[in-house]
């Protein structure tokens, strides 16, 4: 599942390099944020509220 998300992320990066309109650019950036959040959540070994909050906060700060 993680490999699928990583491949999808790479495909969006390739598409992003060819897109010219800002609307498409902004929507692809948003999709990449969700993909990175999915990858981060799948890599959690335990479901602890502190770790989950940190991952979500980190993804929102660095990707937004």
Image: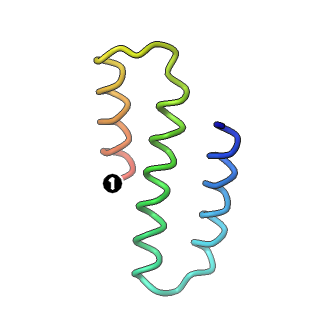
Expressed as whole percent of the image width and height from the top left, the position of residue 41 reads: 47, 31
Against 18, is 42 above or below? Answer: above
| Quadrant of the rendering where the N terminus is positioned | top right
Identified at 69% across, 51% down, the residue is 7
Q: Is residue 7 left or right of residue 35?
A: right
Image location (x, y in percent) of residue 53: 29, 27
Q: Which residue is mark 1?
A: 64
> Which residue is found at the position 43% from the left and 52% from the top?
33
Task: Farthest residue to the bottom: give it.
Answer: 21
Vertical placement of 4 versus 21: above or below?
Answer: above
Q: Is residue 17 above or below residue 60?
A: below
| Image quadrant in which you'd find residue 13 | bottom right
Residue 35: image location, x then y, percent: 51, 49
Furthest-front residue in view?
Answer: 1
Picture quarter containing residue 49? top left
The residue lying at 68 percent from left, 45 percent from top is: 4
Q: How is the image coloured?
A: rainbow
Q: Residue at x 54, y 37 (%)?
A: 39
Total numbered badges shown on the rendered structure: 1
From the viewer's perspective, tell me whether residue 7 is left or right of residue 13.
Answer: right
Which quarter of the figure is the C terminus placed in? bottom left
Left or right: 50 in relation to 14: left
Q: Secondary structure at mark 1?
A: loop
- Residue 34, above or below 40: below
Q: Residues within 10 Å of mark 1 (few under 14, many from 20)?
A: few
Q: Position of residue 59 (x, y in %)?
A: 38, 41
């Amino acid at each position: 599942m993680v490999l699928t998300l990583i491949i999808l992320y790479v495909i969006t990066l390739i598409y992003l390099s060819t897109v010219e309109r800002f609307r498409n650019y902004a929507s692809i950036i948003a999709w990449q944020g969700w993909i990175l959040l999915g990858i981060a959540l799948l890599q959690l070994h335990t479901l602890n509220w502190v770790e989950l909050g940190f991952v979500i906060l980190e993804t929102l700060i660095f990707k937004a």
